[in-house]
Amino acid sequence: MAERINRFMQRFANWLEQRASLAQPWQCCRFVALDLETTGLQVKQHEVLAVAWVNIQPPIMDYGSAQYHLFNQVLVNHTVVDKTVTAPDNSTAAGQSLANDGQTGLGQSPVIHGLTQADFMQSSDPIQTLRMLSRALNDAILVCHNAQLDWRFLQQLSRRYQVKLKPLAIFDTLNFEARRLRQQQQVLTRDSLTLAACRAHYHLPRYTGHHALTDAIACGELLLAQAYAYSRQQRVSARELLKHAR
């Protein structure tokens, strides 16, 4: 009984701490922008090839904190052919996901370019990588473009390697932009919510290629653009900002 009470009190204390942190102006919070390279979009069938992240303490993007890690375990069931990761049936990892309304295609291609078998010779240990990520996410808001998909893959890795990942909250740049465009009564097309398209709405530079680290940085820059455009020098709490990314 005493142990159960202690666990309850600890959870309650954590909840109070989270509530206080999210009540602060969003600029007072630390963010971690993250991107994954996967062999496909089905969490139960596909694997994470690479993970990259970068710390953000608004208004500063800490490029020196950027991390990029490749995992070689997936090569047991997936081969790398012609610089494109290919599934066992020789089909590239293609497909599309949907936004919250179930109608708008993301258009973010999961096809992974530029990865060869030589790249995986310097692969990282998944457990050590996840422990690094766990420390980075402690008391930080996780930022992803299509966070629902990335978080499901991260949870799969967390369970597999028994490393807890507990971000303060999760901010989805895709959902934020989708909501903003709907409020403006704009028609959402298949390509209007890609990371590149969302960045273009804020006149951010276009990055070429498809690489987890580049995309993590691009996602972090998009977060800053979205948040500053939304707050417009007014006091906006992290909680309010997060509501618009659901």
Image (spheres, rainbow, N blue to C red):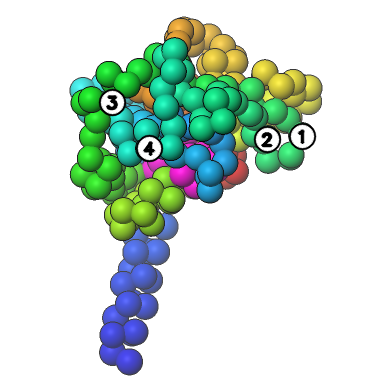
Asked if marks 3 and 2 touch (Cβ < 8 Å), the reply is no
Asked if marks 2 and 1 touch (Cβ < 8 Å), the reply is yes
The residue at which mark 3 appears reads as 120
Q: Which amino acid does label 4 sit on?
A: Val
112 vs 197, nearest the viewer: 112
The location of residue 29, given as percent across then percent down, is 35, 40
Q: In which quarter of the image is residue 12?
A: bottom left
Q: What stretch is highlighted in magenta?
A: 141-153
Asked if marks 1 and 4 touch (Cβ < 8 Å), the reply is no
37 vs 64, nearest the viewer: 37
The residue at which mark 2 appears reads as 98
Q: How far, Cα to Cα, is label 1 from label 4?
A: 35 Å
Q: How far, Cα to Cα, is label 3 from label 2?
A: 31 Å
The location of residue 121, given as percent across then percent down, is 23, 25
Which residue is pictured at 51% across the width and 32% down the height?
Answer: 88
Specify the label residue 103 is tagged with: 1
Q: What residue type is labelled 3?
A: Phe
